[in-house]
């Protein structure tokens, strides 16, 4: 049996790679879909430009995508927890929250700070003059904390809820 910390490191690396691939695919396919993650001044510019008029996602569409993603992520975290040996809700919660936090931290430090804030990533056409706004990291730090408090806890609780009944059977 693999050491628990080694299993966690491998699973966290796989989760980070999958998340990064999903972000890159989303940016390549439809960068405007991430409208809410851009700085307010960039969002304002996007609303004012005619080429983005029909592309900006509605709140209902954004919420729907987040709920669907939460179910998929909860199932993936439950599976990872089960494979790591979690057979009760508490251990599944701890494992899931740990994996979520690893991905969320990588998102904040690498994707948000280096790629978006420092210009290694994508700038939407027509918003290049908002470079100072793109470079502000404060919003991403707040999003990291909200991601931990709201997303991480909710998705990890859902994952542990999926493990609890299976743990009693298995």
Image: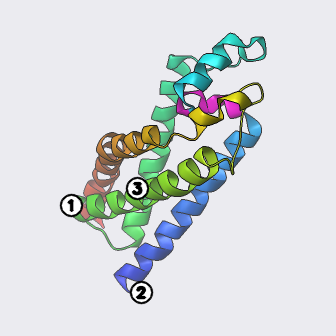
Give the structural element (helix, strand or loop) at label 3: helix
**Left or right relative to 130: residue 40:** left
**Left or right relative to 124: residue 132:** left
Question: Which residue is tagged 1?
Answer: 90
Residue displayed at 68% across by 41% down: 26
Q: Which residues are magenta?
A: 31-37
- Bin the neighbour count of mark 3 within 10 Å (Cα to Cα): few under 14, some 14-19, many 20 and up: many
Query: In the rendered structure, does residue 29 fall within the stretch colored magenta?
Result: no
Residue displayed at 34% across by 62% down: 98
Question: Which residue is tagged 3?
Answer: 100
- Residue 20 screen position, x and y as percent: 61, 55
Going from N to C along the chain, the mark reached first, 3 or 2, is 2
Cα–Cα span, label 1 and label 3:
15 Å
Question: Which residue is tagged 2?
Answer: 2
Give the quarter of the figure containing the C terminus. bottom left
Give whichever of 154, 126 is nearer the camera. 126
- Residue 55 screen position, x and y as percent: 70, 19
- Bin the neighbour count of mark 2 within 10 Å (Cα to Cα): few under 14, some 14-19, many 20 and up: few
Cα–Cα span, label 3 and label 2:
21 Å
In the rendered image, the vertical position of residue 104 relative to residue 131, given as above or below: below
Q: Nearer the viewer, mark 1 or mark 3?
A: 3
Going from N to C along the chain, the mark reached first, 1 or 2, is 2
Give whichever of 150, 85 is nearer the camera. 150
In the rendered image, the vertical position of residue 117 relative to residue 6, given as above or below: above
Q: Does the rendering let one see residue 76?
A: no
**Which corner quadrant of the image does residue 95 belong to?**
bottom left
Give the structural element (helix, strand or loop) at label 1: helix
Cα–Cα span, label 1 and label 2:
21 Å
**Left or right relative to 159: residue 135:** right
């Amino acid at each position: 049996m693999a050491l628990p910390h080694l299993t966690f490191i491998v699973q966290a690396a796989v989760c980070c790679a999958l998340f990064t691939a999903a972000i890159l695919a989303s940016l390549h396919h439809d960068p405007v879909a991430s409208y809410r993650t851009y700085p307010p001044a960039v969002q304002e510019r996007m609303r004012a430009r005619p080429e983005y008029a029909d592309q900006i996602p509605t709140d209902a569409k954004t919420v729907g995508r987040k709920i669907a993603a939460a179910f998929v992520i909860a199932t993936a975290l439950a599976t990872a927890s089960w494979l790591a040996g979690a057979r009760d809700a508490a251990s599944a919660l701890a494992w899931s929250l740990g994996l979520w936090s690893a991905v969320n931290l990588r998102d904040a430090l690498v994707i948000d700070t280096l790629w978006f804030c420092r210009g290694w990533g994508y700038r939407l056409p027509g918003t290049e003059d908002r470079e100072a706004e793109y470079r502000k990291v404060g919003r991403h730090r707040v999003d990291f904390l909200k991601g931990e408090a709201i997303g991480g806890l909710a998705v990890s609780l859902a994952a542990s809820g999926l493990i609890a009944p299976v743990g009693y059977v298995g």
